[in-house]
Amino acid sequence: MKFSHEQRMYYTLRIAAAMCFIGHGSFGIITKPIWSNYFGVFGIAPATSYHLMPIVGSIDILMGIIILFYPVRAIIMWLVIWGAITALLRPLSGEPFAEFIERAGNFGAPLALIILSGGFTLDPRKLFMPLSPNVQSGIDRIRLVKACLCFVVCFLFMGHGWLNLIEKKSLLDQYRMLGFSNPGTTAQCIGLVEIIAGLSVLIRPIRSIVFILFIWKVASELFYPHYELFEWIERGGSYGSILALWFALGVTSSSREGATFPGVAKHFLSNYKVYTK
């Protein structure tokens, strides 16, 4: 069975959203210590937070499983909100703001999926209906999805590059584990390249380069010193956003104006009411 580019985008973003929920929920089950800082933003004491973590984690995992088997629009819309909240809790708890934008895939992938599948709605009849893989979005909506994904991919690479430039400890540990004698210099070089890559995707995304960035992201996320598998799964939104952008570029490549982000943005602004029906 041959899938269209739109269907490939749909399944990629759907799996990515599920991975994000399941991976994030797993940290709640294993009671990741740093989560107590995030509960602390709401004034919840550390002792209480350890009792709440498995509950929150179990709900996340359940939502992820539902997305895999019955992708209800309401749940995916909730993931956009929840993904943004959990990412924002990092700088609110004292971590660098780069931690927020580096996790743009957590809320960006479900956002792109919602846009691809017809947009947001408060209609109860549509909220609790599953999204259809038989996407009939048309080139205009694909361009809007592409614009969304360009921002998401730009943010996640710029955020990760920023964390490299400030020499985040876990990244230095990765480079040290991989045998780099000067992990600080390695982090600086990688950070600069990632920021340039992120900006290039926003300004003029090139399909071959986007695929290289996809390979890089999938491979580089395998080397976290702790919770390797869970870290990799939780970042499914990042891989899914990059791969979905690669598919979107395949759809829009025939249009010269659609080949650059400024052209997409101009087209969207002139047709805003059409996209938000």
Image (cartoon, rainbow, N blue to C red):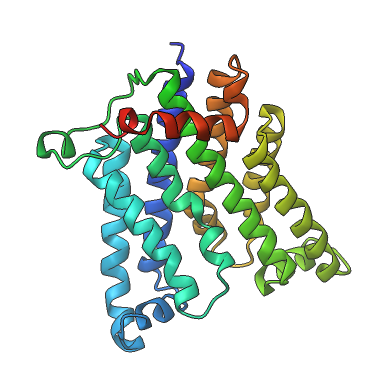
| Figure quadrant of the N terminus | top left
Q: Residue 227's quadrant in the figure? A: bottom right
- Residue 147 in the image: above or below residue 154: above
| Residue found at the far left of this picture | 125
Of residue 10 and residue 225, the one placed in the foreground of this image is: 10
Of residue 116 and residue 239, the one placed in the foreground of this image is: 116
- Residue 139 in the image: above or below residue 234: above
Q: Is residue 76 visible?
A: yes
| Figure quadrant of the C terminus | top left
Residue 9 in percent (x, y) is at 46, 28
Q: Is residue 276 left or right of residue 125?
A: right
Q: Is residue 39 left or right of residue 172?
A: left
Q: Residue 11's quadrant in the figure? A: top left
Of residue 118 and residue 75, the one placed in the foreground of this image is: 118
Residue 219 in percent (x, y) is at 67, 46
Q: Is residue 23 left or right of residue 127?
A: right
Of residue 123 and residue 186, the one placed in the foreground of this image is: 123
